[in-house]
Image (cartoon, coloured by chain):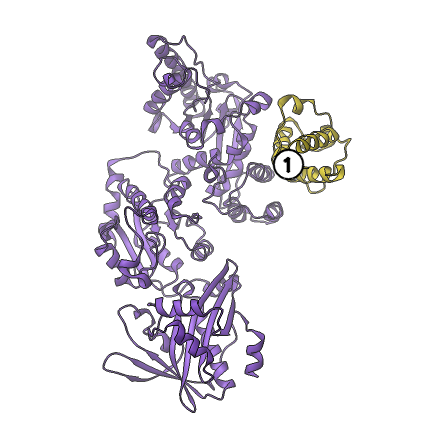
Chain colours: A purple, B yellow
């Protein structure tokens, strides 16, 4: 059973209070956006049924959702399919109304100019037939008989489509037939003309050769059923009981695939894939681990996982999807991987827009879209970090942001299963398009300010935890001190024994910082060491921070904590030092941003800064925890 | 597991599937007594009950069911047989 496909794992799981939220959305005077947001979760078939029921109580147009009238003809019970399709519509920006014919009256509906489907003015018609709904039997073992049988079934489908085109004026969407899993011979089924498997394959080949473009479109149910397993797809008990054409577990996936096709018909398929770098395109953090330290290699299980995402992205580029990069990194450090790492598959000239900087990603993505003259609804953004994903979803709801599994081996499969780039045609122009983006792209001018960043930070409900160095966390402190390269003001390295000595030194202020937010515990994310240089001053010997929590005002909170402690100990001034290295360019302006005053610049580029402990500080921007004994010591 | 417990859990499943928080069931309740419990919903209800209790019914058992009480008994019989109770 494919859990990925059954649970639509690229979508966020449905909220626990789904039904309450649906009711709340329906009571809004303007429910369109709320329905779309709710529908963009991975809804199960009962939840889709609830959405479809809610939509049926509303007018057909629920702005900004676009009304879509869909004819639905086929064999078996189509009520479940209909509810799933209508319930899935809002995820794709539609309010879909299905128009159905009478039970098992496919040909009659299609050929009569006055039938429900013919008269409704539908935008498209789905022909939901399976192997039980077409005349597809013949004597086994005779080539001519097999060919004739497939021909008869094909002629039947063509006749239905001809009727639909003539009377409804709508484009027919024809399903390929999933082969039933019950073998007649075994392996011979593929070889003997007229075996049930052979007949289905013959018909599918003819359908695929015919239904492209103006003739109609193909919904490849055969591929879908094969992907999840035809023995899972077909449920004989359910067929006997309710004539449901496939197991209800697959309704969400089926409806999702159909809706992708409707989106493609409307010309709204996505066109650009924006990729994060660290732990998305390679394992590790380039700024900390360096060119030799990141994981990206053939012959290494983890390295190959990242390569498979790279190679899938390149294949998408070949078919006309633009690639772009958005990463929190130094531009030169990030580009060096593309230029010099021997295992990199994606190279700089594959990338239409390359944004490696320390800005908020939502801001960068908006500027990439502008640079490529694409709407935000044409963008897919892939990032391993759930905080970045959520930030982008909140700031730019039109951008598609797939959930990713923990294991990078499944990144490519998950992105593929999400089906953002569904197309109904492939042309020479598509083949060249990625190149067009390249030529036109120049580095985007970055938008100055992030929209609603403060509101976003609020929604993260961050809690910061300050405590002095201690034995329990000593190893982790030492590890951070020896590993951090980018957000590291002085890059001084200390052994575990030296860290232990700092714990015991009463004159030293040695601070470890943890951060939790709505997504969970980020662990230890910052370390600060202050040493007295004279009776009234502290010099910041070490200040480092994990890049994971950049742009979240952690630095501001840490400064407040330093000042608080300095005051408690009667220290009047804090001196900051920046010692430039190849890797820590991002904190060059750290102290000036925090409001320090410049003191001196040395020949080797070292800068010194001062900050008075008497300066009035603004309010806390997040909740603060301190261990009890620390409070007592400070008082 | 006691009778009341199974009935309460089945009621919760029915509320979810039929999207009706006010729904209440007794052993004597039949499809005719419940708004929305038609033959289509019946299949969805049975599938959801099977999933919730991790049991599987045959078509014969499903079509024989006359009221909620019989469904409760069937669930308990199946769950008991599987050693879940």
Q: Residue A37: percent from the left, percent from the top?
A: 51, 48
User: Where, by quadrant of the figure, is residue A584 drawn?
Assistant: bottom left
Give the position of the C terminus of chain A as an image quadrant: bottom right
Please report the residue visible at 36 percent of the width from the left and 52 percent of the height from the top: A280
Left or right position of A130 against A17: left
Considering only vertical position in the picture, is A408 above or below A493?
above
Q: Residue B62: percent from the left, percent from the top?
A: 66, 25
- In the image as oriented, which residue stretches furthest toward the bottom? A535
Q: Look at the image and tell me whether residue A443 can be seen.
A: no
For mark 1, what is the residue? B53
Q: Residue B12: percent from the left, percent from the top?
A: 68, 40
Q: Nearer the viewer, residue A357 or A84?
A: A357
Question: The disc numbered 1 marks a residue on which chain?
Answer: B
Considering only vertical position in the picture, is A472 above or below A411?
below
Q: Look at the image and tell me whether residue A414 can be seen.
A: yes
Q: Residue A23: percent from the left, percent from the top?
A: 62, 46
User: Where, by quadrant of the figure, is residue A356 drawn?
Assistant: bottom left
Q: Secondary structure at mark 1?
A: helix
Considering only vertical position in the picture, is A209 above or below A52?
above
């Amino acid at each position: 059973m494919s859990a990925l496909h059954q649970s639509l794992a690229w979508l966020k799981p449905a909220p626990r209070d789904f039904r309450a939220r649906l009711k709340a959305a329906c009571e809004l005077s303007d429910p369109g956006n709320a329905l779309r947001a709710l529908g963009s979760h991975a809804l199960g078939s009962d939840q889709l049924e609830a959405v479809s029921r809610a939509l049926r109580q509303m007018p057909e147009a629920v702005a900004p959702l676009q009304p879509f009238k869909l004819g639905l003809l086929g064999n078996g019970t189509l009520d479940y399919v209909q509810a799933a399709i209508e319930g899935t519509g809002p995820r794709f920006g539609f309010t879909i109304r299905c128009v159905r014919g009478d039970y098992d009256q496919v040909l009659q509906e299609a050929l009569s100019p006055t039938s429900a489907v013919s008269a409704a003015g539908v935008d498209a018609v789905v022909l939901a037939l399976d192997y039980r709904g077409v005349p597809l039997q013949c004597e086994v073992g005779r080539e001519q008989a097999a060919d004739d049988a497939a021909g008869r079934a094909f002629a039947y489908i063509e006749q239905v489509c001809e009727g639909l085109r003539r009377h409804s004026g709508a484009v027919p969407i024809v399903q390929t037939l999933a082969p039933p899993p019950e073998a007649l011979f075994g392996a011979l089924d593929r070889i003997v003309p007229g075996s049930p498997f052979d007949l289905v394959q013959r018909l599918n080949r003819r359908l695929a050769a015919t239904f492209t473009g103006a003739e109609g479109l193909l919904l490849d149910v055969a591929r879908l059923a094969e992907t999840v397993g035809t023995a899972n797809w077909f449920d004989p008990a359910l067929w006997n009981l309710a004539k449901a054409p496939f197991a209800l577990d697959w309704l969400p996936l089926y409806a999702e695939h159909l809706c992708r096709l409707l989106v493609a018909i409307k010309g709204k398929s996505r066109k650009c894939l924006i990729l994060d770098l660290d732990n998305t395109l390679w394992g590790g953090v380039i700024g900390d681990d360096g060119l030799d330290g990141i994981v990206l290699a053939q012959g290494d299980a983890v390295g190959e996982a990242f390569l498979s995402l790279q190679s899938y992205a390149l294949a998408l580029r070949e078919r006309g999807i633009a690639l772009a990069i958005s990463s929190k990194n130094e531009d030169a450090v990030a580009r060096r991987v593309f230029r010099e790492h021997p295992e990199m598959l994606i190279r700089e000239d594959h990338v239409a827009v390359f944004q490696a900087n320390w800005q908020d990603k939502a801001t960068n993505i908006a500027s990439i879209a502008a640079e490529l003259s694409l709407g935000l609804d044409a963008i897919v953004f892939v990032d391993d970090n759930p905080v970045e994903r959520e930030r982008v979803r909140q700031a730019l709801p039109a951008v598609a942001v797939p959930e990713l599994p923990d294991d990078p081996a499944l990144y490519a499969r998950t992105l593929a299963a999400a089906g953002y780039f569904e197309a109904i045609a492939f042309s020479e122009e598509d083949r060249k398009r990625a190149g067009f983006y390249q030529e036109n792209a120049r580095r985007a001018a970055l938008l100055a300010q992030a929209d609603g960043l403060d509101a976003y930070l609020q929604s993260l409900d961050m809690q910061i935890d300050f405590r002095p160095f201690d034995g329990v966390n000593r190893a982790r402190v030492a590890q951070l001190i020896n590993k951090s390269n980018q957000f590291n003001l002085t890059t001084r390295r200390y052994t575990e024994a030296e860290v232990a000595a700092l714990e015991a030194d009463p004159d030293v202020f040695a601070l470890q910082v943890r951060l939790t937010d709505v997504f969970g515990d980020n662990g230890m994310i910052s370390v600060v060491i202050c040493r007295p240089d004279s009776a009234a001053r502290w010099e910041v010997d070490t200040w480092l921070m994990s890049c994971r929590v950049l742009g979240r005002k952690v630095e501001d909170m840490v400064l407040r904590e330093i000042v608080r402690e300095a005051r408690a100990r009667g220290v009047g001034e804090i001196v900051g030092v920046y010692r430039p290295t190849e890797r820590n360019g991002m904190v060059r302006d750290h102290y000036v941003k925090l409001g320090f005053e410049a003191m001196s610049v040395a020949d080797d580029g070292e800068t010194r800064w001062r900050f008075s402990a008497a300066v009035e500080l603004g309010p806390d921007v997040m909740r603060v925890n301190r261990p009890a004994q620390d409070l007592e010591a400070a008082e | 597991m006691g009778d009341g417990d199974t009935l309460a859990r089945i009621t919760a499943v029915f509320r979810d599937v039929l999207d009706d928080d006010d729904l209440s069931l007794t052993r004597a309740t039949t499809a005719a007594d419940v708004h929305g419990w038609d033959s289509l919903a019946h299949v969805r209800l049975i599938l959801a009950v099977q999933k919730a209790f991790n049991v599987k019914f045959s078509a014969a058992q499903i079509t024989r069911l006359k009221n909620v009480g019989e469904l409760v008994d069937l669930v308990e019989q199946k769950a008991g047989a599987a050693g879940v109770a």
